[in-house]
Amino acid sequence: MWIIYKLSSSGYSRPNSYQENVPLLLQPSYARSKSLLFDELRNFRISLKWCALDHSSCFGKFISYFAFIFLAIIVPLISSLCIKVPSSTQDCAQDGPVSFNKLVQFPESGLALVGFFILSRFFSKYGLRHLLFLDGLQEDSLFVRRGYTRELDKAFRYLACILLPSFFVELAHKIIYFSTVRVSFPGGGGDPWINSIVMFVLVLASWVYRTGLYLLVCVMFRLTCELHILRFEGLHNMFEGRRSGSDAGFIFREHLRIRKQLSGTSHRYRFFIIASLVVISISQMGALLLILGTHADKSFFSSGELVVCSAVELSGFFLCVLGAARITHRAQGITSVATRWHMTATCASVGGSDSGKGNAGEAADHDQCRDSTSSSSDSDSSSDINIKVLSSQEPPSFQIRQALVAYLQHNNGGITLFGFALDRGLLHTIFAFEFSLVLWILSKVVVLS
């Protein structure tokens, strides 16, 4: 009895130690209110607090709205009004940087406004865990949960790969920019160098806030797309490992759950994608008109900020649309996988029946086929064999597989924008539209010049 007690006690302690080493997202006891040291959402919560986006309390909401109004509206407005070119060097070549500085304020503040509106609505309506689909993650397989844990770790790498290089280029440009221009606050007075330093810090903080706000929404959308891609990969593994018709119902329910979450993702982010496309298109067309319309020399000092702004905008937008196109491609490709699975299962069942009949002998097989079809009309014996297999042995599984394939053929959409699938065809259409706008602007500039 003592030995049995020791074995049971040692066997009981091992799962506890194993559970401590398992990532938190893989443990079924992960509650909604937990925020521990090894929480996979810890990086998101820290980033939201540093970006003043913590809406968990009334004080946090007040700080969030105050920071947005000050850094995304007031600071860009003050910088556009108070930064001027010195009168001693005021000419067309020196006035270019100020014009470009005023131009980039619109897309940066516009994208920050869209991102702040989306995040505020998400946090008040869904919450961070529900927004990232962590509440229903326990229903997924171990493959999906482990893959999503890795994607959570890589999410901020995408953000750092875009934000850090852009920040260093922006920092170098601002140092050169504020060493040349003159800053005069309303009312006058003050040391010009102190005014320049204060405005330099405010403008740089405003740029980091607005850029981080926009890229954070892009990273969250890309993370959601990666989760759905992992689920479609798990669904593909189900088709490879399952052959019986009874498992088709489980595959159907899993695809129905994925499609429901895809529909929710499309409804949540469609305004952000369309608004980002409109703001980026207008800003890029305006920048093209300004660059082609001015005859000043183009250099890093004059147009460096415009280059950084365009690079950040396009990087974040491509991060979104490429992730959406990938998941739409996976959703449309699952029909081909299901068709191949259905064909393989059907051929395997028919081939097994034919091989069993061949082992019984040709004469006996001919007599058995004749007896089985004695009540029917005269027909070819090979067709009678196929009809017999499909009617007496395979109707349930065959019809279930056929119904599943038909369902997937009519429900193969991924991320949609008001009913239009965001796939490669839509990306080609957007590219053609943007390219036609560029050609139209070039024709107008050539005619006017």
Image: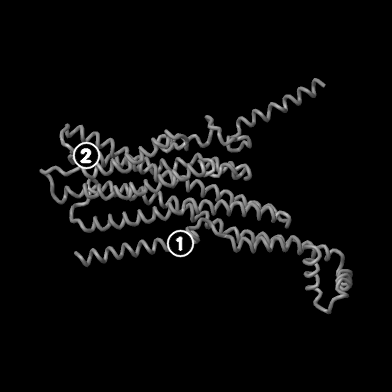
Disc 1 residue type (three-letter): Leu
| x, y percent for residue 237 | 64, 51
Q: Do the numbered discs 1 and 2 sit on residues whose CB atoms are within 8 Å? A: no
The image position of residue 326, as x and y in percent, is 50, 54
Residue 239 showing in the rendered view: no
Residue furthest toward the front? Answer: 58
Q: Which residue of the protein is positioned furthest toward the top in this rendering?
A: 2
Three-letter code for the amino acid on which mark 2 is drawn: Phe
Figure check: 173 above or below 3 = below
Residue 290 lies, in percent from the top left, at 24, 56
Question: Which quadrant of the rendered structure holds the C terminus?
Answer: bottom left
Looking at the image, the residue that sits furthest to the left is 88
Viewer-proximal residue among 18 and 86: 86
Q: Quadrant of the N terminus?
A: top right
Name the residue at 65% across, 53% down.
253
Q: In the structure shown, which secondary structural element does the residue marked by tag 1 occupy? A: helix
Left or right for 402, reference 228: right
Q: Quadrant of residue 135?
A: top right
Q: Is residue 205 left or right of residue 7?
A: left
Residue in front for this viewpoint, 306 or 82: 82
Q: Which residue is mark 2?
A: 178
Residue at image coords 76%, 22%:
6
Q: Which circle's residue, 1 or 2, is located before the other in the chain? A: 2
The label number, if any, that marks residue 426 in the structure image: 1
**Residue 72's mark?**
none
